[in-house]
Amino acid sequence: MTLPSKNIEYGTKEYWDHRYSQHSDSATFDWFKSYAEVAHLIREYVPDKSSKILMLGCGNSSLSEDMWQDGYKNIVNIDYSSVVIQQMKQKYGSIRPGMECALSFGNASFDVAIDKGELCGNLSTVVVDDVAIGTMDAMM
């Protein structure tokens, strides 16, 4: 894994494109917890497995694949890096019907948006307040 020389580089598209170009198309990396560790939360807050799910900053995580295997078949993966999106398309395009990988999408396209980094980073204090709900409603 290529680490940046300065943390600010994590915020650049160039860093992520370079990083993902250094990995094989089949490589996966999960920064935080596995799906097994957060599945109970996803099942609680997204009980309808037919919901259209936007996976924010998917990277090459196995979260979408694990959710697909758990019955969530309508997932769109989006990421900053066109390199990883191309890798995800090649990896899942023909074997995971309903799982898409995109760089853009239309307004009001999703029922649910999942940011694994936020979910795992705040796992001990998952609280959804009125401001967050208002923001999510506006996005959806």
Image (cartoon, rainbow, N blue to C red):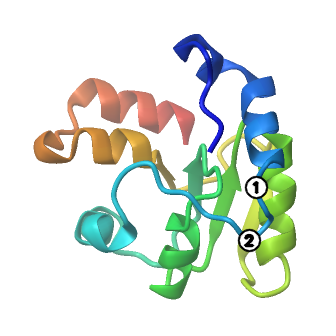
Instruction: Tell me: residue 95, above or below residue 119.
Output: below
Q: Give the camera-side residue of 91 and 6.
A: 6
Q: Name the amino acid, label 2.
A: Ser
Q: Quadrant of the C terminus?
A: top right
Give how far across and how far down residue 103 sits, in percent.
81, 44
Q: Residue at x 81, y 25 (%)?
A: 14
Instruction: Decide: is 2 above or below 25.
Output: above
Total number of numbered discs in the rendering = 2
Q: Position of residue 5 (x, y in %)?
A: 61, 16
Answer above or below: position of 91 versus 16: below
Q: Name the residue: 62% across, 67% down.
A: 75
Residues at marks 1 and 2 touching, judged by CB atoms closer than 8 Å: no
Residue extending farthest left? 124
For the residue pair 44 and 108, the one nearer the viewer reads as 44
Residue 28 vertical placement versus 15 (above, below): below
**Along the horizontal axis of the image, is 51 left or right of 4?**
left
Residue picked out by circle 2: 26
Indicate the amino acid at tag 1.
His
Q: How dense is the environment of label 1, judged by Cα within 10 Å: few (below 14), some, or many (20 and up)?
A: some
The quadrant of the picture occupied by the N terminus is top right
Q: Check disc 1 and report its element: helix, strand or loop.
A: loop
Instruction: Residue 130: give its label.
Output: none
In percent of width and height, residue 109 lies at 67, 51
Q: Residues within 10 Å of mark 2 (few under 14, many from 20)?
A: few
Instruction: Work out whether residue 139 or residue 88 is closer to the camera in this orientation and state it.
Output: 88
User: Percent from the top left, x then y, of residue 51?
Assistant: 51, 69
The residue located at (20%, 32%) in the rendering is 129
Local SS, label 2: loop
Q: Which mark is residue 23?
A: 1
